[in-house]
Image (cartoon, rainbow, N blue to C red):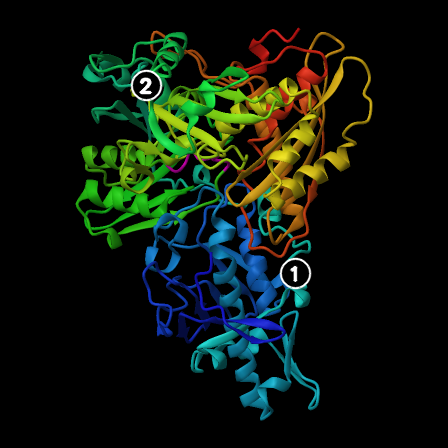
Amino acid sequence: MALLDNEPTAASGVSRRTFLAGTAASGLVIAVALPVGLPRQARAQQVGTATTPNAFVRIAPDNTVTVLIKHLDKGQGIATGLASLVAEELDADPAAIRTEFAPANAALYGNAYFGGFQGTGQSTSMRDSFDKMRTAGAAARAMLVSAAALRWGVPAEEVSVHLGVVSHTGSGQSADFGDLALAAAALPIPEDVLLKAPGDWTIIGKAFPRVDSAAKSDGTAIFGLDARTPDTIVAVLKRPDRFGAVVGSFDAARAKEVPGVIDVISIGLGVAVLARDTWAAIKGREVLDVTWDGSQAETRGSDQMMADLKALADAPGLIAAQNGDVEVAFGDAAQILEADYELPYLAHAPMEPLNVIVDWQGDRCRITGGCQAQSSDQLTAAAILELPPENVEIVTTWAGGSFGRRATPGSNLVAEAVLIAKATNAARPIQLMWTREDDIKGGFYRPMFYHRLRASLAPDGLVKGWRHTLAGQSINIGTPIEGFLVKDGVDAMSVEGAADMPYAFANRLTEVHNAPTAVPALWWRSVGHTHTAFAIESFVDELAQAAGADPLDYRRGLLANHPRHLGVLNLAAEKAGWGTPMPNGQGRGIAVHESFGTWVANVIEVDLSQRDLRVLRVVCAADCGTVVNPDNVVAQFEGGIGFGLGAALQNKIVLEEGRVQQANFDDYLPLRMSQMPKVEVHLIDSAEPPGGVGEPPVPCVAPAIANAIVAAGGKRVRKLPFIDEVLF
């Protein structure tokens, strides 16, 4: 998605306009930003200083280059990726690159995919920032070159830059960035800068050292859990054991007797215990007596909730996509194939449990933690404290995983912490801590979903009509972002991957039922694609079987007009040796899916010969457009495949009478290293714009396993996780 001027000005590169820049006595500050709605012909403006970090690039007299990262890095490596873009266009020495997280400032750091709000998610970070960060680096380089040319009295076009050194071959003069930073800061801002052509890249597409490796290895990296100061009060919240219940009454006497407990207060949704440290707060919570009002609580169990979803699917739903005449196609069918697929609630379970620090000082507030939705967090805190949003400062730290969990539409984590601070009129910072059990039992799950798929087949086995009915919980209905993502009652995140699937069926209907419940739902790594890909790619294999066709060839026929799908499908099949014999009890399965601007195909090999399911090998082909850092992309795919394997094989959240039965990693089982198969990732060489890489590795995992089970002689499994199902 082009956000900046993009007119070629030379064969070797493309022009990008510098929108924002700043100067200061301490060095050169460059920012490049295009807020949503800003005219494309906008010109540069003066903003900020080097001590107010509202720019993308700062070059200091000590020769360091600091890149401000507007997206949360929760382990996915985006800080490294964005820094490498600046380093590429700046021709900086990678060893001189530093990173800091940007403050909350949507005008500078808004995400175009989020309507200009600042935040991280849906694998948009690189897609949103690819041009912006390169332009920031190119603008800084141009100013350094101009400063050197003026100092030496030579034409700017004769000045070169390499690894942080600016030089003029003819005169033999050179200077490093730090020597030129102050002079460069005093120069006019270039209106247009030339970006390198791909053939001139020396960093993009190559390995670039992770900016966080050393700090995370020696313990100096600051995560939210590390940001507590000695005067910080710790809070834990006792929440109801049924979603939708609220505080009726409570008795704090025993909790206040626990050494270290400072106070106990109610915020309606729960009762907070405040203490000098986490242990005291937890022990106080254990003896806290709370009576809950459960009149609006969810009391059903998972089995009943799934039965209710199936009942909804019996009636016509809201139309998400439609073409042709499905009724006619089914009325004239030689055969009708039908299958249903069931998927449970899933928790995100990041390694670092949720936490946030609120330091409220009356007319100002500072929020510190692994903030994934800075604009939402800022606005939520401002509304609760009745402050102007600009008086709420967001200090983003490193985060130990998220998978979507740290970005709720209503910023519930921040809201809880701010409500506690407000209720206690806190004179000291408060850190709200979630335990692992709080997180697993606390909701905001990937929704439970039911899919009913029906296909009308012609005598030759080809599909005449396709009807896909989904029933599940909308993530966005009832939230502040409903107006952006819900149209005519259809939540785009419920049907993504289904309403826009690529298979060429002339008569197709996709419909959805929204199932209300008090259980809070949230986007989970790859969001709706997690369940739509499983249902569709499993059913396409069933169609191939009904037609007596090879699953690979069957897909090729349906995807003839989709070259990027075919590209990954063919590459994965080739690298996996599709069609070559396998030992008895083993089989291969295939699946292909596009999500977040990236096309992925998996061939997965399984072994059932020991009367148990073992995943032996995953061959993944991905087309994610321009690859900025291949090592990081491969790492994301390897990790995403492992994440998808855990969900497919054994993860589930189960409710009994409304109560969650899982609590920690002993019963919500992460994938063990012993379960991790051999993984091969093959990247398509592409000049297309970058796609996402955090979420796309997940959707194809479960269906490829299901299809491999059948190929190995097992039964068709239509319900996840596989651990619960009979395979033989």
Kindly identify the residue that appears in the image at 45 percent across and 30 percent down: 508
* Quadrant into which the C terminus falls: top right
Where is 254 relative to 592, above or below? above
Q: Secondary structure at mark 1?
A: loop
Which residue is disc 2 drawn over? 284
Indicate the position of residue 24 as horizontal and vertical percent values.
40, 74
Where is 363 relative to 306, above or below? below
- Residue 405 shown in magenta: yes
Q: Amino acid at mark 1?
A: Ile
Kindly identify the residue that appears in the image at 67 percent across and 36 percent down: 620
Q: Residue furthest bottom?
A: 153
Q: Main secondary structure of the magenta part?
A: loop
Given residues 285 and 184, the one toward you in this image is 184
Q: Secondary structure at mark 2?
A: helix
Indicate the position of residue 374 as horizontal and vertical percent values.
36, 47
Q: Is residue 359 left or right of residue 639?
A: left
Given residues 445 and 179, the one toward you in this image is 445
Distance, label 1 to label 2, CA atoms, is 53 Å
Q: Earlier in the sequence, mark 1 or mark 2?
A: 1
Q: Amino acid at mark 2?
A: Gly
Indicate the position of residue 448 as horizontal and vertical percent values.
42, 20
Q: Is residue 111 visible?
A: no
Q: Which mark is residue 203?
A: 1
Residue extent of the magenta highlight? 400-407
Where is 282 relative to 568, above or below? above
